[in-house]
Amino acid sequence: MKRWAISLVMAGLLAVALCCLTVIPAAAMVEPPSPQINAKGQVVWEFWDGAHERVYRWDPKAQTAVTISESTYNCEYPQINTKGMVVWSGYDFATTLWQIYRWDPKSAKATNISKNAYNNENRAQINAKGQVVWECYDGGYAQIYRWDPKTAKAANISNNNNTIYNYSPQINAKGQVVWEFWDGVHEQIYRWDPKGVTPEDISQGISANRNPQINAQGVVVWVARDETLTFWQIYRWDPKTAKAANISSNDLWSNTNPQINGKGVVVWKGYGFTLLNQIYRWDPKTATGENISQNSYDNDSHQINAKGQVVWASDEGSGNYSIWLYNPKTGQAGLIWP
């Protein structure tokens, strides 16, 4: 329930979403359904139907949910873009391989866009143009593949001769891609630009880097720790200066899961001496970070929208959760559910 509420409240569709929960019986859900919502209010999620994990898509116009995946393979981690295109990972029982599937609302059909003899891992990402990126294990090492709807072909864009492990790709509206890689010594952040083609290391000089995120302007944020830092911090790379800087700069034990919107506002989860996770927000206008949750609960699952509004879930104990919304105009957070 926690993830459902967070994703759907952001779009102002909480009331509709709660009704939609009755479409799939609770008994059919083995794991949280991981719903995703786009700007049109269309929602996708995965569920267990008793035999396979399927992908469902709900449309606010039709007010109904329909299955868009086949029943011959398992499906995980669906993602939807602003045009209603959906991608997910599908496990083919015949080949025992994971492949990447893409569903197009125009044809109402899903097609295998990876089409290879490798394992194509979970959490494929799709941008507004329909370009898709994912991890592919092509012979013992993880590479980053990118599929372009113009050519209808997938290509290896990390292309580092099977010497480096590449993980967690993210793609923005311009088709720029960032990912995490392990070179055998350090975790670094790579950035690929379709104009420059050759990937570049944007985290040079920092020994441990994880969980990169990129916005429409090409600004990148991630979690990092180097030899001079005791704790994990949030780093931000600006394409205008081509430099990375620590924007959290605090004494918390860990700063994790950064999210960035189109205006460059960053939110993340911080954990320190209070033994509670708090939500922090950094604004490029002031270049300062602040605790916006400021409560006595454990806070998680934060999301930020284009307006800079932030939502998160607070664990009040005994299985009770509440949803909070931060308004940048007032600089205050308020309870919105229950």
Image: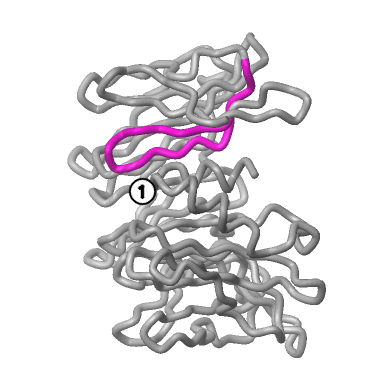
> Which percent across, then down, holds residue 188?
49, 45
- 227 and 190: which is toward the camera: 190
Report the residue at 34% width, 29% height from top. 245
> Which percent across, then down, holds residue 311?
46, 34
Figure quadrant of residue 94: bottom right
> Which percent across, then down, holds residue 331?
32, 17
Q: Is residue 70 left or right of residue 44?
A: right
Find disc 1 in the rendering and name its residue. Answer: 214
Figure quadrant of residue 187: top right
Question: In the image, is residue 243 above or below residue 84?
Answer: above
Q: Which residues are magenta?
A: 297-313
Q: Is residue 18 left or right of residue 91?
A: left
Report the residue at 35% width, 41% height from top. 305
Q: Is residue 325 left or right of residue 163?
A: left
Q: Count the marks.
A: 1
Q: Main secondary structure of the magenta part?
A: strand
Is residue 163 in view from this perspective? Answer: no
In magenta segment, residue 162: no
- 34 and 338: which is toward the camera: 338
